[in-house]
Amino acid sequence: MSLILLIIRGSKAQSLKSELENEVYTTYFGMKNEKPFPLDSKFIVNKKGNKFLEVTEFYNSITKNNLTQIEVFNIWAIRYENEYYYHLYHARDIVSLKSFIKFDVIGDYCAFVVEPSTFVFDTLAYQKSVNQAMAGAVIGGGVFGAVGMAFGYVLYESFKTTEGNLINSLGEKSDIYYIDTKKSVKAIRVGPQKFKKLFPQEKELYQKILKKELTVDELLNLIKAVNSK
């Protein structure tokens, strides 16, 4: 199986909302109950894609010290601009310590979709910086910032060669990663065997995923239905 490497203003109430926008969570239950940890942790977003974030630094907002490597490893999710993002460090088939992807389903069973638009960045200027960074990384041999900026491009190029199990509304190959938060922090790609284990009663849909004809929406709806029980 191919690896995806995977890349204020206003009233007092608005001010409070602003303070809650960027938070760090080490567990699903911390995210669910708005209990960030480590306390006073903040982060710097280097680049933002359609649903993909690249974070360059985590630090304590009071001491200004960077979080330790272990503390960064333990981050399960972050909140950024009122959206929740999963830490791809914990996903199977994905290798990324400072990359985050937006949840499509949040509940006891969380999920996120990986599709071509995941890695489309906001500006053409970013693509130019990616190209420059890749050249710098090759020539300079290991500037962390350069490698980081090139990472989203590597993710996108890798994803284009991966055989997705699903199709999205545009007919593009896609995948869904699923997290059973009661049992694990890991996100697992839902292929035919995983689908059969999760939804043994869905025999017709199982045949569709075998043929790579199951849609993203069909699988998301199944996961949402499980959460509603």
Image (cartoon, rainbow, N blue to C red):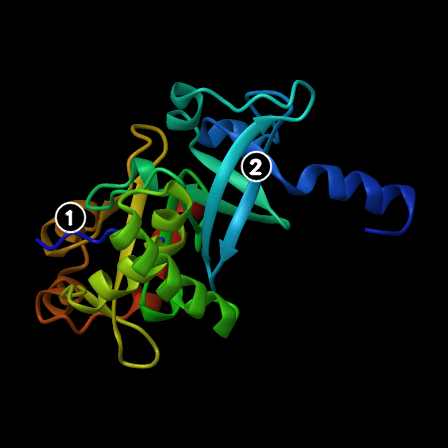
Task: Give the residue at mark 1.
Answer: 194
Task: Give the residue at mark 2.
Answer: 43
User: Image quadrant of residue 150?
Assistant: bottom left
Residue at the image point whose x is 45% and y is 27% from the top: 27
Q: Which amino acid does label 2 sit on?
A: Phe
* Residue that sits furthest to the front in the current view: 139
In the rendered structure, which disc, 2 or 1, sits on the residue that comes first in sequence? Answer: 2
* Residue that sits furthest to the right in the current view: 11
State the SS at label 1. Answer: helix
Q: Residues within 10 Å of mark 1 (few under 14, many from 20)?
A: few
Residue 2: where, in percent of width, then height?
11, 55
* Residue that sits furthest to the bottom in the current view: 170
Residue closest to the eye, 111 or 207: 111
The answer, for residue 80, to whether it is visible in the render is yes
Residue at the image point whose x is 45% and y is 49% from the top: 54
Task: Specify whether 117 is left or right of 139.
Answer: right
Q: What residue type is labelled 1?
A: Lys
Residue 98: where, in percent of width, then height?
40, 40
Residue 121: where, in percent of width, then height?
46, 66
Distance from the alpha carbon under mark 2 to that under mark 1: 34 Å
Task: Specify whether 77 is left or right of 146.
Answer: right
User: Image quadrant of residue 38?
Assistant: top right
Residue at the image point whose x is 43% and y is 69% from the top: 128
Q: Taking 220 as reference, is 33 above or below it? A: above
The answer, for residue 6, to whether it is visible in the render is no
| Tally of marks | 2
Residue closest to the eye, 101 or 58: 58
Q: Given contact means CB atoms under 8 Å apart, are the residues at marks 2 and 1 in contact?
A: no
Q: How crowded is mark 2: few (under 14 residues within 10 Å), some or many (20 or more)?
A: some
Q: Nearer the viewer, mark 2 or mark 1?
A: 2
Residue 56: where, in percent of width, then height?
48, 41
